[in-house]
Image (cartoon, helix red, strand yellow):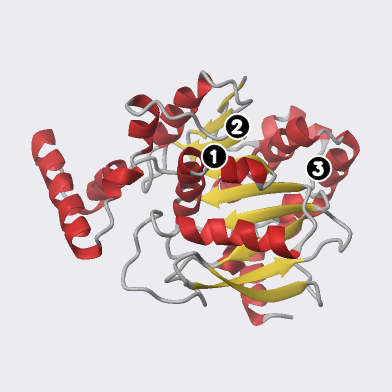
Amino acid sequence: MNPEINKRNKVMRLFFKHKELEFKINDNLIPVKFKTSDNITISALKYITDHNSKKWIIVSHWFSGDKYWSLYWSKEFIELGYNVLVYDFRNHGDSEETQFVTMGLLESKDLVAAINFLNKTENIQIIGLVGLSMGAFVINYLTLTKQKFLEESKVKFIISDSSYATISSLISKLQKLTIKRFFLKKYDIYLIKRILKKQKDLTLSDWNEMNLFNKFEKQNISPAKIPILFIHSIEDKITSHNDSIRMFINRKKFNLNDEILIYETSKHCLSLKEHYYQTIYRILQFENKIIKDNNKTNRALEKMGITDKIILNNFNEKKEISTFFYKY
C-alpha cells in the first residue's frame, strides 16, 4: 500500500477514531499530472471506485495541505459510487513551485485545470466540488468569476468547509492568534491595508480582487447556478464562520437550494472528526437532494456507520445540544 495512505490511515484510526474513513487501496489509485493555463504542472491522483461511473468528486485542500489529505474528505462520495480526483495546489505537495502563494487568486487556475483535465480524459455526467479552507475559497471565488465554465463543466453541487470570503477577514482572524489585542480597530484596518499593499507590490496580484462580499454587495455579480452546502464552526480560530453565513445570505436571493451547517464547537476543518455522524449525514442528504438516488444514499449511510438510532440520538453529539442547520 502507498506509504502516504498508510500514514494517514493511522491518523484516521488513532485521532479521528473512525475506521470508516480508512482506505484499503490496491491498484485503483492512479497518479496523473496536468498543466494550468499559466503553464504550472499540477500533481494529482485519480481514485477509481468504478470504471463505469460517470460521477466525479474533485477535492481542493487547505493551505499547507496536500492531495492525500484531500482523499479522506471524499470517502462518503466513494460509497455513493463516485470516482475522485485530488490534486496539490501549486507550491504544495508534488506540484510545481512558484515564487508566491496567493491564497486562492492564482490557485484558482489549478482547480480550473483539474476540471478541464477531467472533462478531457473522462466521460462525465456529474462533478461535485469539495473545498477546505483555501480550497473552499477557491471554489467560492470561481462561482463568482467562472460561472459559465462551472455550469458547462457539469458541476452540480459544492461542499464549502471553513471558507474565508476576503483576505482581510482571514488576516484579521489570524492577527487575533498572534498579536495581543491592545490596538484600536482603526489601527487593525490600517495594518491590514498595509499588508495588502505590500503583497500587491511583491506579487503583482491584487488580493482586493478576491473580496467575495464586494462581488455580491457592490458589483451585484450573480453566482453560478450551483447549490452549496456551507460548513463552519464558531470555534474556528483560522477562518470566521461569519464569512460562510454572510455568503449564504448573499446567495439567498438567487434561490440556489443552498444549505448551511454551523457548529458551536470544532477546530478548523475538523468537523469530520469532531462531528463525524452529523457532517457525513448532512453531506449525503445534500447530495441526494440534488442527484436524487435514495437507494445509493441509504447504502452509503450504512457503509459510513450512520444508523437511524444514531440520527435519532442527535448524531451521538457529546458537546452540542443543538447545531445551527438551515436549508431553503
Which structural element holds mark 2? loop
Which residue sits at x=81%, y=77%?
A: 27
CB contact under 8 Å: marks 2 and 1: yes
Mark closer to the observer (3, 1) = 1
Judging depth in this view, the residue of 261 and 102 nearest the camera is 102
Which residue sits at x=60%, y=32%?
A: 225
> Where is the N terminus found, in terms of image quarters?
bottom right
Residue named by callout 1:
147
Q: Amino acid at mark 2?
A: Lys
Pointer 2 local density, CA inside 10 Å: few below 14, some 14–19, many at least 20: some
Residue named by callout 2:
225
Locate residue 82, reporting x and y percent. 78, 53
Which residue sits at x=20%, y=64%?
A: 202
Judging depth in this view, the residue of 107 and 117 nearest the camera is 117
Mark 3 or mark 2, which has the lower sequence index?
A: 2
The span from disc 3 to disc 2 (Cα, nearest Å) is 27 Å
Q: Amino acid at mark 3?
A: Leu
Mark 3 or mark 1, which has the lower sequence index?
A: 1
Which structural element holds mark 1? helix
Q: Quick check: 251 left or right of 28?
A: left
> Where is the C terminus found, in terms of image quarters?
top right
Locate residue 174, reporting x and y percent. 28, 50
Which structural element holds mark 3? helix
Seen in the picture, residue 40 relative to 231 is either above or below; the reply is below
Residue named by callout 3:
301
Locate residue 319, reporting x and y percent. 54, 36
The span from disc 3 to disc 1 (Cα, nearest Å) is 32 Å
Which residue sits at x=21%, y=58%?
A: 199
Pointer 1 local density, CA inside 10 Å: few below 14, some 14–19, many at least 20: some
